[in-house]
Amino acid sequence: MIRVLLADDQTLVRAGFRSILSDEDDIEVVGEAATGAAAVAGAHEHRPDVVLMDIRMPELDGLEATRRIAGDPRLDGVKVIILTTFDLDDYVYGALRAGAGGFLVKDTEPAELIHAVRVVSRGDALISPSVTRRLIAEFAGRVKRPEPGPELNALTEREREVMGLVAAGLSNDEIAARLVLSPATAKTHVSRIMTKLGVRDRAQLVIIAYEAGMITPGWLTS
């Protein structure tokens, strides 16, 4: 059972998401929060698998709430999906830096919402690769890229290749198909890369890849 916490200051939005998710046999909405502070408290209380986090909320915005959840070792298994729109500001990039696992646009289709929750709960891939690529490419291009850290030197040539494909939004199965590997081998490569770089999920790999200049927006087409 995938446990979900809904964090949005609009009651109707939370009610809509709850209605959609509660119809699924493998998803349970365990709590709701109308502020960022309540979202953090709810994460501690309910220990959900996924938090659907609005980025603009009172008391504590979704960015800071995400940072606190992602930075707390006690909440290591909690994944955050940011609810956003394409016309948002730099909070989107900041949310990735803070530890968000993916994005959903607020007018997403019900089936996409359900799929997103399932995907992020298992840490298998970013949400909607085309959407995520567009967002990350836009905001990553606005910041000054630091020099690649020494930890990247620990990656093998194959691991760098895999990391680039992760940054492009490909799932493990898609990476396996592109590189003619088994899905299990692709998953192992991704896990080793995350361990070497000390990151908690694939979203953080995307940020590191862009910032290190390993991949540039638009280098890989679908």
Image (cartoon, grey):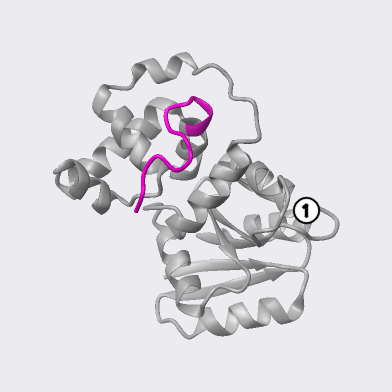
Residue 81 within the magenta-colored segment of the rendering: no
- Find residue 119 and report its image quarter: bottom left
Q: Give the side of residue 12 with respect to residue 46, left or right.
A: right
Quadrant position of the N terminus in the picture:
bottom left
Residue 72 is at least partly visible in this image: no
Horizontal side of 177 relative to 106 (left or right) equals left
| Vertical arrangement, residue 175 with respect to residue 111, above or below | above
- Taking the magenta stretch, the answer to whether it contains residue 212 is yes
Q: In the image, what residue occupies the spot 65% across and 49% down? A: 92
208 w.r.t. 79: above or below: above
Image coordinates for residue 30, horizontal then vertical, percent: 58, 72
- The image shows residue 139 at horizontal and vertical percentages of 62, 42
Q: Quadrant of residue 191?
A: top left
The quadrant of the image that shows the C terminus is bottom left
Q: Circle 1 — which element?
A: loop
Residue drawn at (63%, 57%) of the image: 43
Residue 195 in percent (x, y) is at 38, 31
The span shown in magenta is 210-222
As shown in the figure, which amino acid type bears the numbered disc 1? Asp
Point 55% across, 67% down: residue: 4
- Residue closer to the observer: 44 or 205: 205
Confirm whether residue 55 shows in the render.
yes
The answer to whether 1 is drawn above or below residue 151 in the figure is below
Q: Kindly identify which residue carries mark 1.
A: 61
Q: Main secondary structure of the magenta part?
A: loop
Mark count: 1
Of 43 and 184, nearer the camera is 184
Of residues 48 and 189, which is closer to you in this image? 189
Badge 1 crowding class, 10 Å Cα cut-off, few under 14, some 14 to 19, many 20 or more, is some
Q: Quarter-wise, where is residue 188 in the image?
A: top left
